[in-house]
Image (cartoon, rainbow, N blue to C red):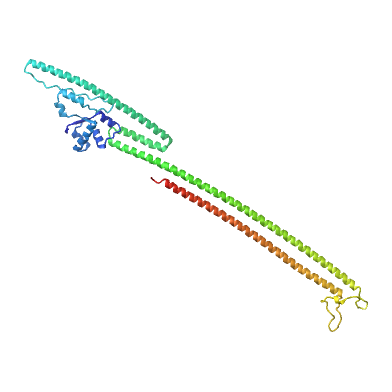
């Protein structure tokens, strides 16, 4: 291998370039530069790789069957016709087979052997016969090699066309799939459209530029990662959304239960207040009935005492009249017992020794009248005391009923407040517990 050595691609090398190559970047770059015309020196200049490194790469590609030493220009010029034909048959150049319509590179004509002039006519005839035989053999080998070469070209072209059709079919199916996805999601349609455009551009430039293929492949991988990341995030967001919905439903249910409990306690409070009011009204009614009963009894007692007083006065007057009828004409009292004169009746006037001008009947009547007046005043005072006691008892009963009702209302309100606080505390604790569980389940493993 010298600087004038020319390399050409094999069928395997062409298929490696047209397909998805797995070669390293430096080997793929050198394989793209091999065109059947560039020498080793030209490849050193184009690849910008040192000659030593380039020789290693070409040796690796040659060992793998991707390239083959096509010919060296000096060797082609110096080789005889038969040797040239054999070398062309072995080193077929598939570099130009980039399309199904590319014609095969014609084989160079077999070079004629140098003429040797024999010293005699017999030797000249034998030499011409040998030369004709060699030419016929060379032409036969050339035709056979051309037929074999055309057959290989046809097979490679058929394989390339089949791969192109398969690739076109795969591209068509990929486009249909992307279009189907585009109809469902606008964002996916936009990304699919960009991916399709980039893929088409990659397919168009992949045959000529390896750097474009690298950029597109990296971009495709980045988009794939982005889609996977977007799908993962969407899945996490969906899980978070379901979790939030569950928490909201739990909170709403807790609030509903707390509200129902508050309504129930409020209803109980209203019923307790109603019962307290009814109890207070009942007690007030009983107190009023008791007061009315006391008033009736007091009025009845006063009326009875008034009638008794009136009867006593009537009896006193009748007694006085009866005794007055027993008085003598000379002014002495007949049949009267002066020991019955009450102590309040005055005795005879001092100094004169005369008797009081009032008669014993009048004195007794006055005494009965004073006694009745005293009893009436005492009864009036007692009635006033009873009425005052009744009013005080009624006020105490009303105050006790009010205090009791207020205590019951306060206790009910405090119970409702405690129940509401407990329900809210339970709801907050449940939400915090679920949130902690959600954070624990989303921790990276």
Relative to 296, residue 123 above or below: above
Q: Is residue 298 left or right of residue 6?
A: right
Q: Position of residue 142 (x, y in %)?
A: 20, 21
The residue at 44%/46% (across/down) is: 438
The quadrant of the rendering that contains the N terminus is top left
Q: Is residue 179 left or right of residue 144?
A: right
The residue at 78%/64% (across/down) is: 301
Residue 309, quarter of picture: bottom right
The residue at 22%/22% (across/down) is: 146
The quadrant of the rendering that contains the C terminus is top left
Relative to 12, residue 239 above or below: below
Q: How many dots with numbers?
A: 0
Q: Residue furthest left?
A: 119
**Is 441 in front, or is 25?**
441
The residue at 78%/62% (across/down) is: 300
Residue 214, quarter of picture: top left
Q: Is residue 36 left or right of residue 415?
A: left
Q: Position of residue 286 (x, y in %)?
A: 71, 58
Residue 32, quarter of picture: top left
Q: Position of residue 335 (x, y in %)?
A: 91, 75
Q: Position of residue 138 (x, y in %)?
A: 17, 20
Q: Residue furthest right?
A: 329
């Amino acid at each position: 291998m010298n600087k004038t050595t020319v390399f050409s691609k094999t069928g395997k090398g062409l298929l490696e370039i047209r397909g998805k190559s797995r070669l390293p970047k430096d080997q793929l770059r050198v394989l793209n530069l091999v065109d059947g015309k560039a020498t080793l020196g030209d490849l050193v200049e184009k690849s910008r790789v040192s000659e030593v490194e380039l020789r290693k790469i070409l040796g690796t590609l040659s060992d793998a069957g991707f390239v083959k030493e096509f010919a060296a220009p000096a060797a082609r010029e110096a080789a005889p016709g038969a040797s040239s034909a054999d070398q062309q048959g072995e080193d077929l150049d598939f570099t130009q087979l980039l399309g199904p319509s590319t014609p095969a590179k014609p084989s160079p004509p077999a070079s004629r052997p140098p003429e040797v002039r024999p010293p005699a006519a017999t030797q000249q005839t034998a030499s011409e016969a040998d030369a004709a035989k060699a030419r016929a053999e060379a032409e036969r080998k050339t035709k056979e090699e051309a037929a074999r070469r055309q057959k290989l070209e046809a097979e490679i072209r058929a394989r390339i066309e089949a791969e192109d059709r398969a690739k076109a079919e795969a591209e068509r199916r990929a486009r249909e799939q992307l279009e189907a996805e585009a109809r469902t999601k606008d964002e996916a349609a936009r990304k699919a459209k960009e991916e399709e455009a980039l893929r088409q551009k990659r397919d168009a430039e992949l045959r000529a530029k390896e750097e474009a293929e690298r950029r597109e492949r990296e971009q495709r991988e980045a988009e794939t990662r982005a889609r996977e990341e977007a799908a993962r995030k969407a899945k996490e967001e969906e899980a978070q959304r379901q979790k939030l919905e569950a928490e909201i439903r739990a909170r709403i249910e807790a609030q509903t239960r707390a509200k129902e409990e508050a309504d129930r306690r409020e209803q109980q409070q209203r019923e307790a207040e109603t019962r307290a009011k009814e109890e207070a009204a009942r007690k007030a009614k009983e107190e009023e009935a008791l007061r009315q009963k006391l008033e009736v009894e007091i009025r009845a007692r006063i009326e009875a005492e008034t009638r008794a007083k009136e009867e006593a006065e009537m009896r006193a007057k009748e007694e006085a009249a009866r005794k007055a009828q027993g008085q003598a004409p000379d002014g002495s009292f007949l049949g009267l017992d002066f020991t019955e004169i009450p102590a309040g009746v005055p005795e005879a006037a001092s100094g004169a020794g005369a008797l009081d001008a009032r008669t014993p009947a009048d004195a007794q009547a006055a005494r009965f009248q004073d006694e009745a007046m005293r009893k009436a005043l005492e009864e009036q005072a007692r009635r006033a005391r009873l009425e005052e006691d009744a009013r005080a008892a009624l006020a105490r009963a009303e105050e006790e009923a009010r205090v009791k009702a207020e205590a019951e209302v306060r206790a009910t309100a405090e119970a409702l407040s405690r129940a509401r606080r407990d329900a809210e505390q339970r709801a907050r604790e449940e939400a915090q517990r679920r949130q902690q569980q959600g954070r624990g389940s989303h921790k990276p493993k």
